[in-house]
Image (spheres, grey):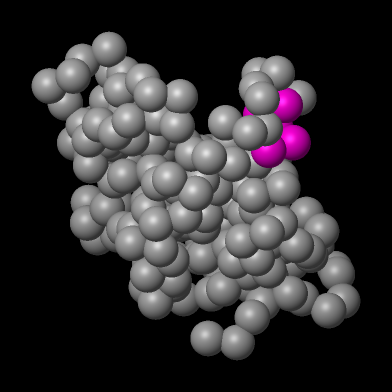
Amino acid sequence: MTGVLAVAGGTASGKSTLAEALSLQCPESVTLIHLDDYYVPAHDPLRGVWTVSADGHAVLDWNHPGSIDETAAAHAIDAALQRPGVLLVVVEGLFALSLPSVLRRAAWRVYVETPDDIRLARKILRKIEAQRQDPRLSLRNYLQTGRDRHAAHVAPSRAAADLIVDGTASKAEMLAAVMPLIGPALTSPPAAPSQTREGCGVPDTPGVPALAM
Protein backbone atom coordinates (compact mmCIF):
# COMPACT_ATOMS: atom_id res chain seq x y z
CA MET A 1 0.00 0.00 0.00
CA THR A 2 1.34 3.43 -0.94
CA GLY A 3 2.07 5.79 1.94
CA VAL A 4 2.95 9.44 2.42
CA LEU A 5 6.04 10.75 4.19
CA ALA A 6 5.84 14.42 5.20
CA VAL A 7 9.19 16.18 5.68
CA ALA A 8 9.17 19.63 7.30
CA GLY A 9 11.73 22.00 8.74
CA GLY A 10 12.81 25.61 8.56
CA THR A 11 14.22 27.37 5.53
CA ALA A 12 17.60 25.83 4.55
CA SER A 13 17.29 23.16 7.24
CA GLY A 14 18.13 20.35 4.81
CA LYS A 15 14.62 19.01 4.23
CA SER A 16 14.84 19.25 0.44
CA THR A 17 18.24 17.56 0.50
CA LEU A 18 16.80 14.68 2.51
CA ALA A 19 13.66 14.38 0.38
CA GLU A 20 15.60 14.39 -2.89
CA ALA A 21 18.05 11.81 -1.52
CA LEU A 22 15.11 9.55 -0.68
CA SER A 23 13.68 9.87 -4.18
CA LEU A 24 17.08 9.03 -5.70
CA GLN A 25 17.44 6.06 -3.37
CA CYS A 26 14.37 4.45 -4.92
CA PRO A 27 13.57 6.40 -8.12
CA GLU A 28 11.03 3.90 -9.47
CA SER A 29 9.11 3.63 -6.21
CA VAL A 30 9.22 7.15 -4.75
CA THR A 31 7.44 10.28 -5.97
CA LEU A 32 8.57 13.64 -4.63
CA ILE A 33 6.27 16.62 -4.14
CA HIS A 34 7.73 20.03 -3.28
CA LEU A 35 5.20 22.27 -1.53
CA ASP A 36 7.17 25.23 -2.91
CA ASP A 37 5.52 24.38 -6.25
CA TYR A 38 2.08 25.08 -4.79
CA TYR A 39 2.25 28.68 -3.68
CA VAL A 40 -0.61 30.78 -5.02
CA PRO A 41 0.33 32.99 -8.02
CA ALA A 42 2.55 35.83 -6.84
CA HIS A 43 0.81 38.21 -9.26
CA ASP A 44 -2.67 37.67 -7.75
CA PRO A 45 -3.13 40.08 -4.80
CA LEU A 46 -6.51 38.52 -3.95
CA ARG A 47 -4.98 35.18 -2.94
CA GLY A 48 -2.52 34.20 -0.28
CA VAL A 49 -1.04 36.29 2.52
CA TRP A 50 0.85 39.43 1.58
CA THR A 51 3.51 41.39 3.41
CA VAL A 52 5.90 44.28 2.81
CA SER A 53 9.50 43.31 2.02
CA ALA A 54 12.43 45.06 3.66
CA ASP A 55 12.91 46.99 0.41
CA GLY A 56 9.39 48.42 0.71
CA HIS A 57 7.60 46.30 -1.92
CA ALA A 58 4.37 44.38 -1.34
CA VAL A 59 5.15 40.69 -1.84
CA LEU A 60 3.55 37.32 -1.29
CA ASP A 61 4.50 36.07 2.16
CA TRP A 62 6.44 32.90 1.33
CA ASN A 63 6.81 32.16 5.05
CA HIS A 64 3.08 31.92 5.77
CA PRO A 65 1.07 28.70 5.22
CA GLY A 66 -1.84 30.78 3.96
CA SER A 67 0.15 31.44 0.80
CA ILE A 68 0.07 27.77 -0.20
CA ASP A 69 -2.72 26.52 -2.48
CA GLU A 70 -3.57 23.69 -0.12
CA THR A 71 -6.28 22.25 -2.36
CA ALA A 72 -3.91 21.95 -5.32
CA ALA A 73 -1.25 20.35 -3.12
CA ALA A 74 -3.75 17.82 -1.77
CA HIS A 75 -4.88 16.91 -5.29
CA ALA A 76 -1.25 16.37 -6.32
CA ILE A 77 -0.68 14.03 -3.38
CA ASP A 78 -3.83 12.05 -4.15
CA ALA A 79 -2.85 11.74 -7.81
CA ALA A 80 0.63 10.52 -6.87
CA LEU A 81 -0.86 7.91 -4.54
CA GLN A 82 -2.76 6.44 -7.49
CA ARG A 83 0.28 6.24 -9.75
CA PRO A 84 1.22 2.64 -10.68
CA GLY A 85 4.42 1.40 -9.11
CA VAL A 86 4.68 4.17 -6.53
CA LEU A 87 5.20 2.91 -2.98
CA LEU A 88 6.02 6.18 -1.26
CA VAL A 89 5.04 9.80 -1.81
CA VAL A 90 7.45 12.23 -0.14
CA VAL A 91 5.97 15.68 0.53
CA GLU A 92 8.53 18.26 1.62
CA GLY A 93 8.21 21.90 2.54
CA LEU A 94 8.11 24.44 5.32
CA PHE A 95 4.52 23.54 6.09
CA ALA A 96 4.47 19.79 5.45
CA LEU A 97 3.57 19.24 9.11
CA SER A 98 1.41 22.37 9.41
CA LEU A 99 -1.13 22.07 6.59
CA PRO A 100 -4.05 19.89 7.75
CA SER A 101 -4.59 18.29 4.33
CA VAL A 102 -0.97 17.12 4.20
CA LEU A 103 -0.85 16.07 7.83
CA ARG A 104 -3.98 13.92 7.46
CA ARG A 105 -2.46 12.01 4.56
CA ALA A 106 0.94 11.44 6.15
CA ALA A 107 1.63 7.96 7.49
CA TRP A 108 5.11 9.10 8.58
CA ARG A 109 6.22 12.56 9.70
CA VAL A 110 9.78 13.85 9.87
CA TYR A 111 11.08 17.21 11.06
CA VAL A 112 14.57 18.29 10.02
CA GLU A 113 16.03 20.41 12.80
CA THR A 114 18.95 22.77 12.20
CA PRO A 115 20.16 25.68 14.38
CA ASP A 116 18.84 29.06 13.28
CA ASP A 117 22.28 30.55 12.66
CA ILE A 118 23.24 27.71 10.31
CA ARG A 119 19.94 27.96 8.44
CA LEU A 120 20.35 31.71 8.01
CA ALA A 121 23.94 31.34 6.78
CA ARG A 122 22.87 28.67 4.28
CA LYS A 123 20.01 30.83 3.02
CA ILE A 124 22.18 33.92 2.55
CA LEU A 125 24.82 31.93 0.69
CA ARG A 126 22.12 30.42 -1.54
CA LYS A 127 20.64 33.84 -2.29
CA ILE A 128 24.06 35.24 -3.17
CA GLU A 129 25.06 32.30 -5.35
CA ALA A 130 21.73 31.71 -7.12
CA GLN A 131 20.22 35.21 -7.30
CA ARG A 132 23.14 37.58 -6.67
CA GLN A 133 20.98 39.09 -3.92
CA ASP A 134 22.44 41.62 -1.55
CA PRO A 135 22.81 39.75 1.78
CA ARG A 136 21.61 42.84 3.62
CA LEU A 137 18.14 42.35 2.11
CA SER A 138 18.03 38.72 3.27
CA LEU A 139 19.06 39.74 6.77
CA ARG A 140 16.50 42.54 6.95
CA ASN A 141 13.70 40.27 5.71
CA TYR A 142 14.71 37.66 8.28
CA LEU A 143 14.62 40.20 11.11
CA GLN A 144 11.42 41.84 9.85
CA THR A 145 9.27 38.75 9.29
CA GLY A 146 11.20 35.53 8.64
CA ARG A 147 12.22 34.80 12.22
CA ASP A 148 8.72 35.39 13.59
CA ARG A 149 7.03 33.37 10.84
CA HIS A 150 9.31 30.41 11.57
CA ALA A 151 8.50 30.62 15.29
CA ALA A 152 4.76 30.84 14.61
CA HIS A 153 4.20 28.42 11.73
CA VAL A 154 7.15 26.04 11.33
CA ALA A 155 8.86 25.35 14.66
CA PRO A 156 5.61 24.28 16.42
CA SER A 157 5.09 21.54 13.79
CA ARG A 158 8.07 19.71 15.31
CA ALA A 159 5.60 18.35 17.87
CA ALA A 160 3.75 16.45 15.11
CA ALA A 161 6.86 14.55 13.97
CA ASP A 162 7.49 10.84 14.47
CA LEU A 163 11.21 11.47 13.98
CA ILE A 164 13.50 14.47 14.41
CA VAL A 165 16.52 14.42 12.09
CA ASP A 166 19.70 16.47 12.53
CA GLY A 167 19.94 18.79 9.52
CA THR A 168 23.66 19.37 10.09
CA ALA A 169 24.41 15.69 9.44
CA SER A 170 25.57 14.33 6.11
CA LYS A 171 23.11 13.25 3.45
CA ALA A 172 23.98 9.59 4.08
CA GLU A 173 23.44 9.98 7.82
CA MET A 174 20.05 11.64 7.34
CA LEU A 175 19.02 8.83 4.98
CA ALA A 176 20.12 6.24 7.51
CA ALA A 177 18.00 7.92 10.17
CA VAL A 178 14.84 7.90 8.06
CA MET A 179 15.03 4.56 6.26
CA PRO A 180 14.13 2.44 9.31
CA LEU A 181 10.93 4.49 9.63
CA ILE A 182 9.79 4.02 6.02
CA GLY A 183 11.71 0.87 5.08
CA PRO A 184 8.71 -1.50 5.26
CA ALA A 185 6.81 0.62 2.72
CA LEU A 186 9.66 0.41 0.24
CA THR A 187 9.91 -3.36 0.46
CA SER A 188 6.22 -3.98 -0.17
CA PRO A 189 5.42 -6.67 -2.77
CA PRO A 190 4.59 -5.47 -6.30
CA ALA A 191 0.97 -4.80 -7.13
CA ALA A 192 0.81 -7.31 -9.99
CA PRO A 193 2.43 -10.77 -10.39
CA SER A 194 4.06 -9.70 -13.65
CA GLN A 195 5.96 -6.89 -11.92
CA THR A 196 9.24 -7.35 -10.15
CA ARG A 197 10.90 -4.86 -7.88
CA GLU A 198 13.93 -5.12 -5.66
CA GLY A 199 13.76 -3.50 -2.26
CA CYS A 200 15.53 -0.18 -1.93
CA GLY A 201 18.89 -0.25 -0.26
CA VAL A 202 19.22 1.13 3.26
CA PRO A 203 22.46 3.04 3.81
CA ASP A 204 24.72 1.30 6.30
CA THR A 205 25.87 4.34 8.21
CA PRO A 206 26.90 4.28 11.88
CA GLY A 207 25.83 6.98 14.27
CA VAL A 208 22.33 7.69 12.94
CA PRO A 209 21.57 11.38 13.69
CA ALA A 210 18.03 11.03 14.97
CA LEU A 211 17.40 13.40 17.86
CA ALA A 212 15.54 12.60 21.05
CA MET A 213 11.83 13.31 20.85
> Up-down: is 129 above or below 97?
above
Magenta stretch holds residue 127: yes
Q: Quadrant of residue 129?
A: top right
Which residue is at the front of the view, 61 or 33? 61
Q: Position of residue 1 (x, y in %)?
A: 39, 56
Q: At 21% across and 15% down in the image, what residue appears?
A: 44
Q: Position of residue 25 (x, y in %)?
A: 71, 47
> Up-down: is 178 above or below 4?
below
Q: Position of residue 180 (x, y in %)?
A: 63, 72
Could one spot residue 198 in this view of the protein?
no
Could one spot residue 61 in this view of the protein?
yes
- Give the residues drawn in magenta, as a range: 124-128
Q: At 51% across and 45% down in the image, what residue appears?
A: 142
For this orientation, the residue located farthest to the top is: 43
> Up-down: is 85 above or below 160?
above
Q: Main secondary structure of the magenta part?
A: helix
Q: Quadrant of residue 171?
A: bottom right
Q: Position of residue 205 (x, y in %)?
A: 86, 69
Q: At 57% across and 57% down in the image, what residue appears?
A: 186
For this orientation, the residue located farthest to the left is: 46
Which residue is at the front of the view, 22 or 170? 170
